[in-house]
Image (cartoon, grey):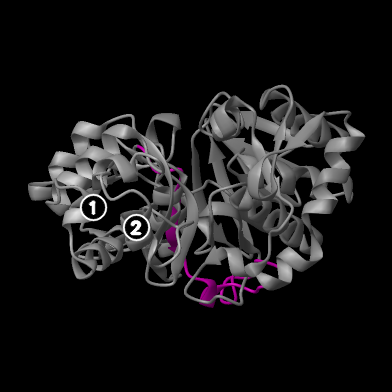
């Protein structure tokens, strides 16, 4: 902590967005104080991507984000692209690789990204107060913040404290609480990128815990081809995490278990191998336990040659559009991000500043902009932080 009480900007939240915003603003010559109630910065970065940090996605555009205003993210994303962040990673000598669907990961550890951000903060002369709770007041055109026992002030305050996901890492409603105090509207926060739970008749699929398959999962406008994983509580895996962001109570998840098979494949199989059972035929495409469960549910134990073409067509339709109605999700404890948050209607898409409160900025997960699984939320953190830092 510094001896001086006045700063150009105070940033609350030392996650991806907060650290990057502090670094950029500091390197622009601004006197910046970065505060976090956790003694350790970047805790969600550290666990991300299995400890290797899926730090961006090379295909990130505004179409990969959910928001009450689907156009809001365009400005920030266009002015700070995945290539821009890759340049920074390369300058720090951090080796990385591309996995599936444009996802970029560190070859080594997520710790490298946190270390990079802290080095960038140091280069900008950013002062830090970690492990310190903050209390905010606004008077005389400035934000007055009590950090522990120290009183500091600045004409600009940046809320970068995230959403409600993964409370064991310190997630709180801090950003929403401050926003409400200033009269900013909140879009209902919900868990996103989260496993879904099953009950009732569908609970039998829990016996498949640990089984995964490449599927197409869909809820409304959200359709994703990736792996689905059955768990002891219900459904997970990348495809399910993706559609969970679109899910509301009562919604049905539709899964195509055979996305690569063309219409009429069972009738063709009947002609080619009439003595095969449906279970055996499905076993050529799906894991054995899943093939057994699906064929049992379809109620066709006989050889294909003993089934009518109409029955085979009905089985095809069911396998291509199997419906699950989750009874819930595993909540914020298991959600990778929070959907909803501080309304984009309250913010400038160019600067991330609140329209009705001069000097108040909101960035990262606290904003009602939520990315798909696969590095998109980190790219929003970098882009929104860049937008705010340029305006500070």
Q: Main secondary structure of the magenta part?
A: loop
Residue range of the region highlighted in magenta in the rendering: 334-358
CB within 8 Å, label 2 to label 1: no
**Is disc 1 surrounded by few (<14), some (14 to 19) or many (20+) residues within 10 Å?**
many
Closer mark to the observer between disc 2 and disc 1: 2
User: Which x, y percent locates residue 324?
Assistant: 23, 56
**Which residue does the image show at 58% across and 24% down from the upper left?**
40
Residue 110 visible in the picture: yes
Residue 197 visible in the picture: no
Determine whether 207 is above or below 136 in the image: above
For mark 2, what is the residue?
A: 271
Please tell me which residue lies in front, 295 or 266: 266
User: Which x, y percent locates residue 109?
Assistant: 68, 23
Disc nearer the start of the sequence (2/1): 2
Q: Is residue 58 left or right of residue 316?
A: right
Q: Is residue 236 left or right of residue 46?
A: left
**Which residue does the image show at 79% across and 42% down from the upper left?**
23
User: Which x, y percent locates residue 84?
Assistant: 84, 52
Determine whether 357 is above or below 203 in the image: below
Q: Which mark is residue 304?
A: 1
Q: Is residue 343 left or right of residue 269?
A: right
Residue most extreme to the left: 200
Q: What SS does tag 1 mark?
A: helix
Splitting the image into 4 quarters, where does residue 47 fall? top right
Q: What SS does tag 2 mark?
A: helix
**Which residue does the image show at 33% across and 45% down from the upper left?**
282
């Amino acid at each position: 902590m510094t001896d001086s009480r006045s700063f150009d900007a105070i940033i609350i939240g030392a996650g991806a967005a907060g650290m990057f915003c502090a670094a950029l603003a500091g390197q622009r010559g601004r006197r910046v104080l970065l505060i976090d109630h956790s003694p350790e910065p970047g805790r969600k970065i550290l666990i991300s991507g299995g400890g290797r940090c899926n730090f961006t996605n090379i295909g990130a555009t505004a179409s990969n984000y959910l928001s009450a205003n689907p156009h809001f993210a365009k400005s920030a994303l266009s002015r700070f692209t995945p290539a821009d962040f890759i340049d920074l990673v390369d300058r720090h000598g951090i080796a990385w690789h591309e996995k599936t669907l444009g996802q970029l990961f560190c070859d080594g550890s997520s710790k490298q990204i946190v270390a990079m951000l802290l080095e960038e903060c140091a280069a900008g002369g950013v002062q830090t107060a970690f492990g310190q709770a903050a209390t905010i007041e606004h008077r005389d055109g400035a934000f007055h913040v009590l950090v522990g026992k120290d009183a500091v002030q600045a004409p600009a305050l940046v809320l970068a404290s995230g959403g409600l996901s993964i409370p064991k890492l310190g997630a709180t409603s801090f950003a929403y609480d401050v926003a409400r105090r200033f009269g900013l509207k909140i879009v209902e926060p919900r868990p996103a990128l989260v496993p879904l739970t099953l009950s009732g008749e569908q609970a039998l699929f829990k016996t498949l815990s640990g089984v995964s398959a490449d599927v197409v999962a869909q809820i409304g406008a959200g359709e994703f081809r990736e792996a689905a994983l059955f768990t002891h509580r219900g459904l997970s895996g990348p495809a399910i995490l993706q559609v969970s962001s679109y899910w509301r109570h009562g919604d049905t998840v539709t899964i195509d278990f055979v996305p690569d098979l063309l219409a009429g494949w069972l009738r063709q199989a009947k002609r080619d191998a009439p003595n095969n059972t449906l279970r055996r035929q499905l076993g050529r495409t799906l894991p054995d336990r899943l093939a057994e469960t699906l064929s049992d549910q379809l109620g066709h134990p006989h050889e294909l040659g003993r089934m009518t073409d109409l029955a085979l067509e009905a089985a095809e339709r069911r396998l291509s559009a199997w419906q699950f109605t989750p009874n819930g999700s595993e909540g914020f404890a298991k959600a990778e991000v929070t959907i909803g948050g501080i309304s984009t209607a309250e913010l400038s898409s160019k600067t991330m500043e609140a329209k009705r409160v001069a000097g108040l900025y909101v960035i990262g997960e606290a904003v009602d902009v939520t990315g798909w699984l696969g590095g998109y939320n980190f790219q929003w953190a970098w882009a929104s932080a860049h937008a705010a830092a340029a305006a500070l």
